[in-house]
């Protein structure tokens, strides 16, 4: 699943191409909105909260409307230049198709979440989320308060809980546990959460604001050297040369995601049996 910074960068690219454009024709290929018509609406901005995309439109003489989408594992958005079309093999995957008056088109593929909601009701779909470090309304104190509330919960599972702090996915969580020197199964009460949150904010903002640095946590952009532990099972730790360990995801259990760690650099509880 894309992480919060990936979704943020996607929104930035969509805004660079589509902000201020007027919809000529819309096609929402989901049952609940199959008859919706955004023709004549102006795309104001695509915003994000965690891993959610909020594309806002203004419609003449009507309240604002927001297209809420989520990529989950397989979803994507692409912008097509005038005269360009998606390959026919992708037609069954289209969930949203927007044609604009300037000739550009935007296609949302394999989107598991497609909703039209009044813009003033966005909290109905994202109000449950925790603070997001990439938003202007970021509140570090609130993020810390929510995270420390799960004082007996394992650290990695707590960081992945989007209601505590929005935007951290499995890659960032595994890397943060390594960088702070904690086993992913360390109880939250044993962790300096304010320091961890400060580091998470710095990493996420560096990822989205530094060209070529997206999701690079080691400072090394060479293949296989970009991350400390994530995706490096069986390889030597870049610090101590101990072999990186991994446990597989347990399907249907949000507390048991695929997890990588260095047993030497991250002392603490082992994975549950």
Image (tube, helix red, strand yellow):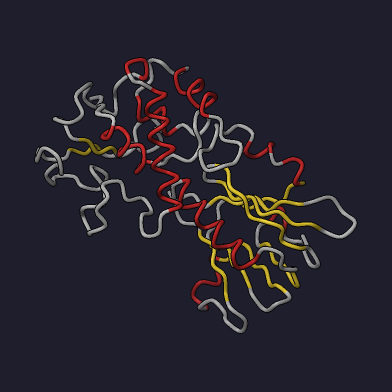
Residues 106 and 11: in front is 11
Snapshot quadrant of residue 258: top left
Count of all numbered marks drawn on residues in the image:
0
Q: Residue furthest bottom?
A: 83
Q: Quadrant of residue 78?
A: bottom right
Q: Quadrant location of residue 155?
A: top left
Q: Is residue 249 visible?
A: no
Quadrant location of the C terminus? Answer: top left
Q: Observer-nearest residue: 143 or 63?
A: 143
What residue occupies the far right of the structure in this picture?
61
- In the image: residue 229, left or right of residue 110: left
Q: Which residue is at a point 64% across and 34% down the rendered structure image? A: 127
Q: Is residue 52 visible?
A: yes
Residue 12 at what x, y percent from top left?
Answer: 55, 58
Q: Residue furthest left?
A: 241
Residue 254 to residue 45: above or below = above
Which residue is located at x 44 percent, y 47 percent? Answer: 3
- Report the residue at 58% width, 62% height from top: 14
The percent coordinates of residue 31 (x first, y second) are 69, 56
Residue under the point 58% across and 47% down: 48
Q: Residue 65: percent from the left, percent from the top?
A: 76, 52
Tell me where residue 148 appears, x and y as whole percent.
44, 19
């Amino acid at each position: 699943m894309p992480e919060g910074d990936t979704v943020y960068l996607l929104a930035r690219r969509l805004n660079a191409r589509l902000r201020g454009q007027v919809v000529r024709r819309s096609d929402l290929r989901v049952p609940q909105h199959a008859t919706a018509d955004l023709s004549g609406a102006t795309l104001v901005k695509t915003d994000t909260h965690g891993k959610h995309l909020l594309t806002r439109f203004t419609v003449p003489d009507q309240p604002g409307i927001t297209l809420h989408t989520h990529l989950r594992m397989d979803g994507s958005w692409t912008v097509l230049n005038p005269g360009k079309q998606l390959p026919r093999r992708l037609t069954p995957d289209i969930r949203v198709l927007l044609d604009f008056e300037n000739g550009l088109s935007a296609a949302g593929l394999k989107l598991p979440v497609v909703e039209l909601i009044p813009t003033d009701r966005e909290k109905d779909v994202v109000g449950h989320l925790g603070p997001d470090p990439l938003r202007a309304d970021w509140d570090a104190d609130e993020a810390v308060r929510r995270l420390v509330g799960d004082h007996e919960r394992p650290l990695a599972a707590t960081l992945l809980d989007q209601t505590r702090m929005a935007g951290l996915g499995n890659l960032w969580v595994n890397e943060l546990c390594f960088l702070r020197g904690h086993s992913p199964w360390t109880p939250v009460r044993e962790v300096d959460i304010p320091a961890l949150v400060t580091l998470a904010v710095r990493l996420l903002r560096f990822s989205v604001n530094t060209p070529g640095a997206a999701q690079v946590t080691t400072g090394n952009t060479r293949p296989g050297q970009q991350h400390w532990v994530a995706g490096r099972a069986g390889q030597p730790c870049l610090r101590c040369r101990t072999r990186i360990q991994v446990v597989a995801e347990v399907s249907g259990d949000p507390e048991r995601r695929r997890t990588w760690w260095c047993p030497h650099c991250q002392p603490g509880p082992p994975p549950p049996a």
